[in-house]
Image: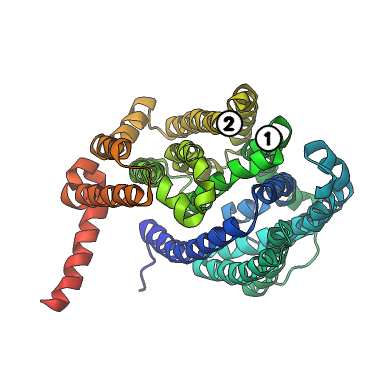
Amino acid sequence: MAQHPSNSQNVIKGISSQALVTIVLGLVEILSFSIMSRLLTQEDFGYYAVITAITTVFASFSDMGIGSAIVQQKELTKRYVDNAFTISLLFGFSLSLLLLVCSGPLSLMLADASMRIPLMLMSGTLLLHCLTSVNNSLMHRKLQFLRMGGINLFSLIITTCVAVWLAYKGFGYYAIITKAVLGSIITYLLSFYFCKTHFSFALDKATFRRIFAFSGWLMASSIFRNLAHQIDRLLMPRLLSVSALGAYNRPKDFVEQISTKLNGIFDTALFPVLSGIQDNLSKLKSAFCRSMFLMNAFALLLTSAFVFNSGIIIRIFFGEQWMELKDVMMTISCSLLFNIDGRLADCYLRSLAMTKQQFFFRIFEFVLKIIGILMAFKCGLVGVALSIVITNSITKIIKILYVGNKIGVGLKSTFEIIFSSWRYGLVLIPVCSIAMAHLPKTWGGDIALSCLFLVVTVIIFLGFPSLIGKTYHDDVYVKITSFVDSKTKKYR
């Protein structure tokens, strides 16, 4: 009898597939980022940041959490899928029309009238976004991560080439607007083809209620999540200026592009698996403890990599003209420390259908960020960045503690897991901090600091695995050494 893969094997397979796709997508996006940073101005990026912030908030309504409801559903029927498709179509069309009508007033309220036409163009992406969400959720449910990644990669390559050409020809931020619109069209068409599902119109009360029993609160949560995430971009044009927003958003966008892709590896792979064990408390508790340790160890490494390598990153991927934003980038990078905890907590809340609780967490985060930004904007870009870091950290710590407590992991145990995963930082951070303070702020100094960071990291993770912790030593280090041994045997 054929053996079915275990939950751990499913997670590993999903993470492996996602990691492969993420690496390739990340390389293309970084190349695009580097080129566009040299072709467009801070003002161009500022306008685009406001436009995408508005579109993202509207997209919260168009998605409504229906995609997650399809993944979470234990027994998925054709009737359920058709209802989900119909609801997404109706809401997506309505919201596209609403943004089209409101494009003028929103432009004047948040920046100026020049944003009206770009907003009108972006309105069509809302309908495509919610329809694509249904297609992707069906592939997500089947753990078809490589297929989903291939679609995103093809779309990214085509749209990047078009955007770079338009930017080179002097079209300004319309180049990145075109990339977003064209990308949504290509992604929808390919996802519709590869999900291999024939949709029909259906809208009955029973299925409608079943969908919204899960996704109603998730939609409300998604709205406030995106408001909280975009509030700095929405407030800064008026509090400071569009150019200041462009300067602030460029390093933030770079950090978020990479961190979102990496966090998405875990989220995409874990969500369907956690949904499958949602009634097994002991398995949920075990998965929580192990993932908390490994992800927080990774989060500290990722944060340190951005902070200590910010100089060389800006020189290579932004250009010398952006070096004045080094302090902003170092500050924003600190928010990565608890980002994975936030994604892990969200994953558990969705998997356990605790969408109402998630909604209240989002409101708290949104209000806290508004207060923080209004208090900090007089300190300039670094002040705004610091307020975002502090409010992000507070909300994510509270959220992960709540989830841990709900599944039987106490507050003390959760803190112990986090701090034990950071032990190696007692060596890594002081060594790199001393070097950064004494090395010159030049190409040579930045390269030397990056090399030192790499050497110290390799020595710690491969030479002293016990310093990281038992979970790392037993789960990761053993696999690394076994892999290396198997490869070196071929050359002995």
Vertical placement of residue 367 versus 53, above or below: above
Which residue: 66% across, 58% down? 133
Question: Could you tell me if residue 203 is visible in this image?
Answer: no
As drawn, the label of residue 236 is: 1
In the rendered image, the quadrant that contains the N terminus is bottom left
Which residue: 87% across, 45% down? 104
Q: Position of residue 386 (x, y in %)?
A: 52, 30
Q: Position of residue 68 (x, y in %)?
A: 61, 52
- Along the line of sight, the residue nearer the viewer: 44 or 483: 44
Q: Is residue 319 left or right of residue 62?
A: left
Contact between labelled residues 2 and 1, with CB atoms less than 8 Å apart: yes
Vertical placement of residue 109 versus 412, above or below: below
- Along the line of sight, the residue nearer the viewer: 409 or 247: 247
Which residue: 58% across, 58% down? 38
CA distance separating discs 1 and 2: 9 Å
In the rendered image, the quadrant that contains the C terminus is bottom left
**Residue sitting at the far left:** 492
Q: Position of residue 99 (x, y in %)?
A: 83, 49
Which residue: 62% across, 71% down? 161
Query: Which residue corresponds to mark 2?
Result: 384
Kind of residue sitting beneath label 1: Met
Among the two numbered marks 1 and 2 on one chain, the one whose residue lies closer to the N terminus? 1
* Secondary structure of the residue carrying numbered label 1: helix
User: How many residues crowd around disc 1 within 10 Å: few (fewer than 14), some, or many (20 or more)?
Assistant: many
Vertical placement of residue 329 versus 410, above or below: below
